[in-house]
């Protein structure tokens, strides 16, 4: 937030300070996004609270929130810009440990996948694994997935098959994500909403959101570990049974 020592800003001075037109400031006021100024005589004066609020609005707009959604958030937090900013930042924080994207070329992908096929690149783009940058360059959104693809290629798994597995994983991950989001909305957000979004409960809701991240990750890994163990046991149990039956037939 910008620090403002002078709390006696006219609307023209406020506009210059924040880089916004007077018309837009008045529009924010009419929408209920900005508290009214302190009126002395016939002049309205603005201060640090107004600057902080406008910076919050600009930040939320840059992140894709429309003005009506911003108004509801601010209203729900009883005008507390700090709580709204903390909560929306918590929402936007990556759910897992953030990876720094890497830039790769089409030639590097062909070498990694052991095949040059534009259709595979298009499929990877559709899955969100690659983002085209032009000039045959791509942003690899998850280098860990890229390393997994390389390992599979080294094991002899065709790139097309690996991407198909990735597509299935994404579908299952979408289902798991929806389950946890539904859990948060129904068990945490709905009671908070029903209570009128009390200002003193905003920290609790944010804390619940932040604690949900490691809980969801650990739960998913634990369930996957159990499922993988059972699947391997069942699959290789069948393979061993087939091998044993084949051995008995050959002996006959």
Image (spheres, rainbow, N blue to C red):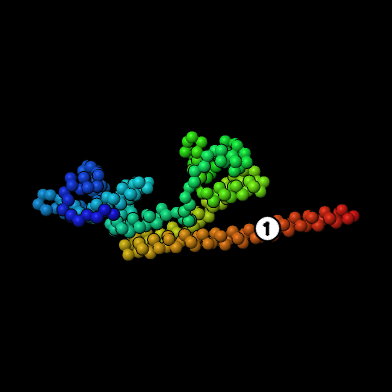
Question: Callout 1: 10 Å neighbours few (<14), some, many (20+)?
Answer: few
- Front-lying residue, 28 or 138: 138
Q: Kindly state the secondary structure of the residue where label 1 is placed.
A: helix
Any part of residue 83 in sight: yes
Residue at numbered disc 1: 232
Any part of residue 186 in sight: no
Furthest-right residue in view? 252
**Residue 196 appears left or right of 165:** left
Which percent across, then down, holds residue 97?
Answer: 48, 56
**Residue 187 appears left or right of 221:** left
- Front-lying residue, 49 or 177: 49
Q: Could you say which quadrant of the image residue 249 lies in?
A: bottom right
Q: What residue is rendered at 47% in x and 59% in y?
A: 213
Quadrant into which the N terminus falls: bottom left
Quadrant into which the C terminus falls: bottom right
Q: What residue is rendered at 33% in x and 49% in y?
A: 59
Which percent across, then down, holds residue 19?
Answer: 25, 44
Q: Could you say which quadrant of the image residue 186 lies in?
A: bottom left
Q: What residue is rendered at 32% in x and 62% in y?
A: 198
Which percent across, then down, holds residue 169?
Answer: 57, 50
**Residue 247 appears left or right of 7:** right
Q: What residue is rendered at 53% in x and 62% in y?
A: 218
**Residue 104 appears left or right of 226:** left
Which percent across, then down, holds residue 80?
Answer: 29, 58
222 versus 151 height, above or below:
below
The number of discs equals 1
């Amino acid at each position: 937030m910008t620090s403002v020592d002078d709390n006696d800003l006219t609307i023209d001075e406020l506009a210059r300070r924040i880089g916004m037109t007077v018309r837009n400031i008045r529009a924010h006021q009419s929408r209920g996004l900005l508290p009214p100024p302190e009126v002395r005589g016939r002049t309205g004066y603005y201060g640090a609270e107004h600057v902080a609020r406008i910076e919050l609005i600009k930040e939320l707009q840059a992140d894709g929130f429309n003005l009506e959604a911003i108004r509801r958030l601010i209203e729900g937090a009883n005008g507390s810009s700090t709580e709204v900013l903390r909560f929306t930042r918590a929402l936007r924080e990556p759910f897992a440990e953030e990876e720094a994207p890497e830039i790769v070329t089409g030639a590097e992908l062909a070498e990694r996948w052991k095949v040059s096929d534009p259709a595979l690149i298009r499929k990877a783009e559709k899955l969100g694994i690659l983002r085209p940058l032009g000039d045959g360059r791509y942003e690899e959104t998850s280098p860990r997935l890229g390393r997994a693809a390389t390992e599979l290629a080294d094991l002899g798994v065709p790139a097309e098959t690996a991407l198909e597995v990735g597509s299935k994983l994404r579908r299952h991950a979408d289902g798991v994500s929806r389950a946890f989001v539904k859990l948060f909305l129904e068990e945490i957000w709905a009671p908070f909403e029903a209570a009128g979004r009390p200002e003193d409960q905003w920290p609790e809701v944010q804390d619940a959101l932040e604690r949900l991240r490691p809980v969801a990750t650990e739960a998913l890994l634990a369930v996957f570990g159990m499922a993988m163990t059972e699947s391997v046991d069942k699959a290789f149990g069948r393979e061993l049974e087939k091998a044993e039956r084949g051995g008995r037939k050959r002996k006959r």
